Image (cartoon, rainbow, N blue to C red):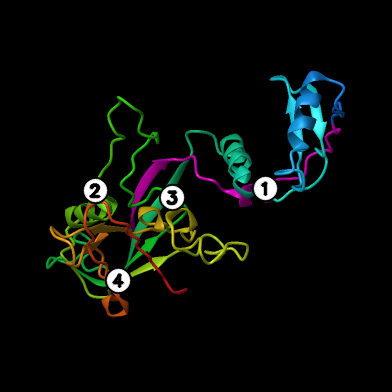
């Protein structure tokens, strides 16, 4: 057996790590000033009195940079954190793992190894199988590169690499070991994390988009495929629809309808539906 390892500087979000730590001693709850007696409290009270937001459930905690409480409103209550949870899981990952921690995605071979001095046999055939084992690398196979940053006006766009480049790199390394053919096929394993790709609190209309992609220990290209629609040269003709990357696993059902091309300035609407599963 051998393993090819891909190392990655890790800022991965691993909420489960926090559960594995020993419980810390209770931290005294800070006392926050309440009410509208202060200028900040008065401004916040006026904002929350607006009928457009008055019926919402608000929780506010304002501190100075050293943690000194400045203002509070329902700050001790529990809230559904939504995307704010990313701030805490990122902080936990950085605190427990550190910025130099790495995650390994492994290509593991198992099977007949041939002669000891030529573990793949002189014919370059692996008489066994290969397993792609994921351990939580959120950037594996992605076209994004580190460090992540958004495009800024007047600045060059973020550097990218071809999607699925990691597979080409692994294949090249495998060939460098003398492997030319595999008889047992390839499997993918995501068992390092509990299997919960789509939490039950997500809406079905979210899973169509990149921010609602399923999550697992084996993520490839951010677990998403981009769909590009290009109009034809003249109105009335069908548009061109293409997947990126163009993997044959996904199929576009053109029998349910097609995307046409309208004249310049006309109203156009494209509807995409993806059935669960």
Secondary structure found at label 2: loop
C-alpha span from label 1 to label 2 = 35 Å
Choose the circle earlier in sequence order: 1 or 2: 1
User: Mark 3 or 4, which is nearer the eye?
Assistant: 4
Quick one: label 3 or label 4, which is nearer the N terminus? 3
Of residues 83 and 94, the one nearer the viewer is: 83
Residue at which label 3 appears: 137
Q: Whole-Å distance between the Cαs marked 2 and 4?
A: 19 Å
Q: Earlier in the sequence, mark 2 or mark 3?
A: 3
- Please identify the quadrant where the N terminus is shown: bottom left
Residue at image position (18%, 67%) is: 236
Q: Which residues are magenta?
A: 1-29
Q: CA distance from mark 2 to mark 3?
A: 17 Å
Q: Which residue is mark 1?
A: 81
Q: Position of residue 39 (x, y in %)?
A: 79, 19
Q: Secondary structure at mark 4?
A: loop
Q: Nearer the viewer, residue 189 or 126?
A: 189
Label 2–label 4 contact, CB within 8 A: no
Q: Quick one: label 2, few (<14), some, or many (20+) residues within 10 Å?
A: few
**Badge 4 is on which residue?**
249
Label 1: element kind: loop
Which residue is pictured at 85% across the width and 33% down the height? 29
Using the image, tell me which numbered label, if any, was put on residue 162: 2
Residue 47 position within the rendered picture, expressed as x and y whole percent measured from the top left: 73, 33
* First reached walking from the N terminus: tag 1 or tag 3: 1
């Amino acid at each position: 057996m051998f393993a090819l390892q891909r190392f990655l500087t890790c800022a991965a979000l691993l909420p489960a790590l926090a559960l594995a730590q020993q419980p810390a001693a209770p931290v005294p709850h800070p006392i926050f000033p309440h009410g509208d007696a202060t200028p900040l409290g008065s401004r916040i009270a006026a904002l929350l009195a607006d009928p457009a937001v008055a019926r919402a459930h608000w929780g506010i905690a304002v501190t100075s940079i050293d943690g000194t409480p400045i203002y509070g409103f329902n700050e001790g209550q529990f809230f559904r954190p939504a995307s704010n949870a990313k701030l805490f899981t990122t902080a936990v990952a950085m605190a427990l793992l550190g910025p130099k921690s790495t995650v390994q995605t492994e290509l593991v071979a198992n099977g007949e190894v041939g002669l000891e001095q030529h573990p793949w046999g002189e014919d370059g055939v692996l008489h066994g199988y290969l397993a792609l084992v994921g351990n939580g690398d959120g950037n594996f196979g992605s076209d994004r590169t580190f460090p992540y940053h958004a495009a800024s006006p007047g600045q060059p766009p973020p550097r990218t690499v071809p999607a699925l480049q990691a597979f080409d790199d692994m294949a090249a390394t495998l060939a460098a070991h003398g492997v030319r053919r595999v008889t047992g096929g390839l499997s993918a394993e995501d068992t390092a994390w509990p299997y919960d790709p789509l939490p039950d609190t997500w809406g079905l209309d979210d899973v169509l988009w990149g921010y609602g992609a399923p999550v697992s220990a084996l993520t490839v290209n951010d677990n998403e495929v981009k769909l590009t629609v290009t109009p034809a040269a003249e109105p009335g003709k069908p548009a061109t629809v293409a997947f990126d990357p163009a993997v044959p696993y996904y199929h576009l059902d053109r029998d349910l309808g097609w995307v046409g091309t309208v004249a310049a300035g006309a109203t156009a609407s494209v509807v995409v539906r993806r059935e669960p599963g």
